[in-house]
Amino acid sequence: MATSTFDPTLSLLLLSKFPIPPLIVVLLAGIALLWFAPGGVAWAFSRAARAVPGPPGVVLALSGTAAHRALAKLSHSLRASKLMAFSVGFSRFIVSSHPETAKEILCSSAFADRPIKESAYELLFHRAMGFAPYGEYWRNLRRISATYLFSPRRISAFGQQRREIGAHMVGEIQSLMGRDGEVEIKKVLHFASLNNVMMSVFGKRFDFGEGEGLELEGLVKEGYELLGMFNWSDHLPLLGLLDLQGVRRRCKKLVSKVNLFVGRIIEEHRCKRSAFGAASSSSVCDFVDVLLDLEKDEKLSDADMVAVLWEMIFRGTDTVAILLEWIMARMVLHPEIQAKAQAEIDAVVGEFKLVSDEDITNLHYLQCIVKESLRMHPPGPLLSWARLAIHNVNVGDYFIPAGTTAMVNMYAITHDECVWSEANEFKPERFMEEEVSIMGSDLRLAPFGSGRRVCPGKAMGLATVHLWLAQLLQSFKWLPSKPGVDLSECLKLSLEMKNPLICRATPRS
Ligand code: HEM
């Protein structure tokens, strides 16, 4: 009868054939243990009594162009919608795909910082509001911008400028239609949006495609690309030394150009003020003037001013243009919804008057279209830039160590059938039936984030989107072009349409 007794000579034979030193065996076992820890490598040394559920190993999804979808799928499959842990290199992450834990994270003082990416640091954004650490400097910037840039009075003061830029956009679409018979709407929206922010921030409008306008477009494009790029150096410190993706090199080059460009505009303002006196620009017409006025008491250095001004251009341009492109794609895809919105505009504004800011409060259906588009296509599906735990904290029943990066998957929440009925249907009517605030108090739909670091530009962004959408719908009937509408997504700094919308606009009157 065969016995199962282990023959020690066999082990000697094996070891002599494959001599693995015991230290290596221990090391391999250790690595395997780390790798298979819930949440992966970076969570292996967490001292939590109850581990946050999460995939082992290292998650590569963040480096892809559909990170929001991949994370939603992973959280769902691991039944970890409330909270999932994962590792990217040696960085510890958690992600919430549930309104409850999303609120806990966004509204907790523990998560009032943001993790600073190498590109953001190199581009000086740590001196701007979005990446500045939670503290006196950040609070100051929020207060200044809330008072002088984003207050309801300032937003309504910019109304005429918004309307003029919108009308200019309508003219441009008309001429492109005349020339090409179709229009790539994103280019027009991007020009308009950039000019709108430039007017509010720099008091200056540019002609795009030439001179300073062309230079600015190049700077903004390069900046978007660098900030939107997944940089392995952020998560594997050793790689940082090598700068294999060339991020640091490109940032350094860009930042010197930005310094020159924005520095020139600040100097122009200084010259104007010394020639005519600060008081003569009495209406404090743009944000540069505001910052110059505050210079003495608030002590913003030139370098800080460049960072603050530059950030506003970044944050304000992309989000508005991208959201409007998604909305127009929906208008082309759903002609009955488009017609209903146009009927509302005609009824509220009248057929012979051009729509203005004052009409927007009465355009309820139009506002529902914007809400539904933000639900289906949130420009920041992972709420753009994440939060960082400043100290140890509990989220739900889980212990989260200081230094963990926290994300909210707003896309997963707004596409969850348990949260929204018929979640994958575009139905603006749902908001006619139920009033839902999108400003951050209701985490079922918080495209601008929530809590201390909620988007300060939300009211300004919405005012622009509402008015321009009304102007575009009042002026044209929107139809598909030959290739139709492709709703494929591509996540860069914001969630963009993978293939730009090309459509036809025929005048309505
Ligand atoms: C459709 C338009 C917009 C969307 C969807 C949007 C979305 C967001 C989101 C999700 C955040 C992160 C919030 C959080 O962490 O809780 C954010 C932050 C921010 N946004 Fe916006 N945004 C928009 C327009 C604007 C505009 C027009 C500006 C300025 C001109 C702006 C300036 C900022 C700034 C400075 C921050 C950082 C705030 C901080 O960390 O204290 N945004 N935005």
Image (spheres, helix red, strand yellow):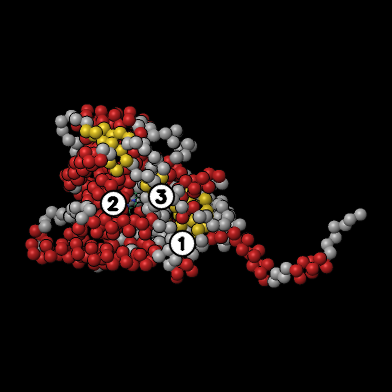
Q: Looking at the image, is mark 2 or mark 1 nearer the viewer? A: 1
Q: Residues within 10 Å of mark 2 (few under 14, many from 20)?
A: some
Q: Is residue 43 left or right of residue 360?
A: right
Q: Residues within 10 Å of mark 3 (few under 14, many from 20)?
A: many
The quarter in which the N terminus is drawn is bottom right
Q: Earlier in the sequence, mark 3 or mark 2?
A: 2
> Residue 360: percent from the left, percent from the top?
23, 37
Q: Which residue is mark 1?
A: 232
What residue lies at 25% left-to-right and 51% top-to-bottom?
194
Tell me if I can see residue 368 in this picture: no
Tell me if I can see residue 9 in this picture: yes
Q: Earlier in the sequence, mark 2 or mark 1?
A: 1
Q: Is residue 83 left or right of residue 315?
A: right
Q: Which mark is residue 491?
A: 3
The quarter in which the C terminus is drawn is top left
What residue lies at 17% left-to-right and 55% top-to-bottom?
204
Q: Amino acid at mark 1?
A: Trp
Q: Which mark is residue 316?
A: 2
